[in-house]
Structures are given as structure tokens and as C-alpha cells.
Image (tube, rainbow, N blue to C red):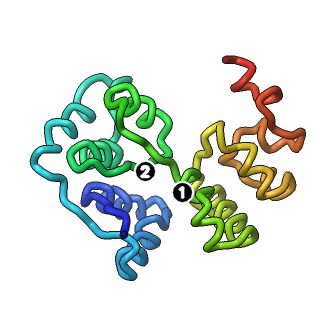
Amino acid sequence: MPFEITRTVVDELARGRGNGRSAADELASWLHVGLAVEVSLPTEAEEVFLSLVGGSAASTIDDGEAATFAYAVATGSRPVTDDKKAIQIARSRFPDLNVCTTSDLLLHANCRAALGEDGLANCIENALKRALMRVPDEHLDRVVTLLGYERASQCRSLPHWARQGHGITASTSPIAKAS
């Protein structure tokens, strides 16, 4: 079953080309081979979309994430985003919505089986370096272990403390200590 990508996201990624980003080209190849399909925002999703983009900066998210969540709410699908603020707002507004991150997808057993350990490590490293993928705290240990400390230290989108090579565990994570 292909990923469903809203037209809003396709357009947003296309605008990123002017900033040297290649996500639109990568998405175009997914669309071409059928790994993804472009979908329109259903009429019943419009109110949710507008509620997510209208208001104070603290309570709104960008159009791409808003369209993704509105589509998911309307269709019962599972949204994928790495935007931390968007995830927090979605979990607050739609507690039953099961938000997924790129890390969730890449670390899934099916992806690991399809790519193998080396292929998965290369894929994650590319996502970290080229797309500046954000890795949720609960996946940092697995990602750093998979990459190894030397490769992880070169991935500037990982938190500084995760690139230090001292090991990441629930007891050493500054996030876990703050909780």
C-alpha cells in the first residue's frame, strides 16, 4: 500500500527546491514508482486544517503538517512527520491519532529486513545528513548503536550529547534526567 501524500505537502516540498533541498525530487521518484500517491484534502478535513494553521504562532503548525494531520483525522490514516512542535500539538488536540516519525518507519522490522543492517545504517545516515531528520529521544540509542559512534558523531541533526560517544541510556540522557 503506497504512502498518501497531500497536495499541500507536495507543493511545500517543491518550494524547498529554491533553497537547495532535494526532498521534492526524492518524492517525485516515490510517486513515479508507486511508493506514494498524491491525494487531495477531503472537504471534511478543511475545518481541522484551518484550525491548525489559524491562531497564535505557539498553537499553529505549517501547512504541510496541518494538511497531513487533517487528512489523517478525516480518513483514519496514520500521519508521518518529524516536526516536534507539530507532533506535540497533534497529540494534544487528537489524542487517538497515532503519529509516526521517519525513525519509526526506518527502524521497523520490515524496513530492517528489506534493507539489512548495513543498508539501514546507510539510509539512516543519509536521512540524518541530507534531510536533517530529527530522531525522537526514544530512538536515539538504537540509531547511535546502529550507526556506531564515529558515524553518529558526523550527523549534525542528532543532539550534541548523542554525538559524544559516551553511550546513551535512560540514565545518561539529559532528557531522561530532566523528567
Q: Residues within 10 Å of mark 2 (few under 14, many from 20)?
A: many
Q: Where is residue 174 in the image (x, y as percent from the top left)?
A: 75, 25
Label 1: element kind:
helix
Horizontally, residue 5 falls left or right of residue 108, namely: left
| Front-most of residues 79 and 29 | 79
Q: Position of residue 90 (x, y in %)?
A: 37, 33
Q: Position of residue 146 (x, y in %)?
A: 77, 57
Disc 2: which residue: 80
Disc 1: which residue: 105
The quadrant in which the C terminus is found is top right
Could you tell me the amino acid type at mark 1? Leu
Separation of disc 1 and disc 2 at Cα?
9 Å
Residue at screen point 34% across, 41% down: 62
Which image quarter: residue 140? top right
Image position of 43 with respect to 50: above or below: below
Label 2: element kind:
loop
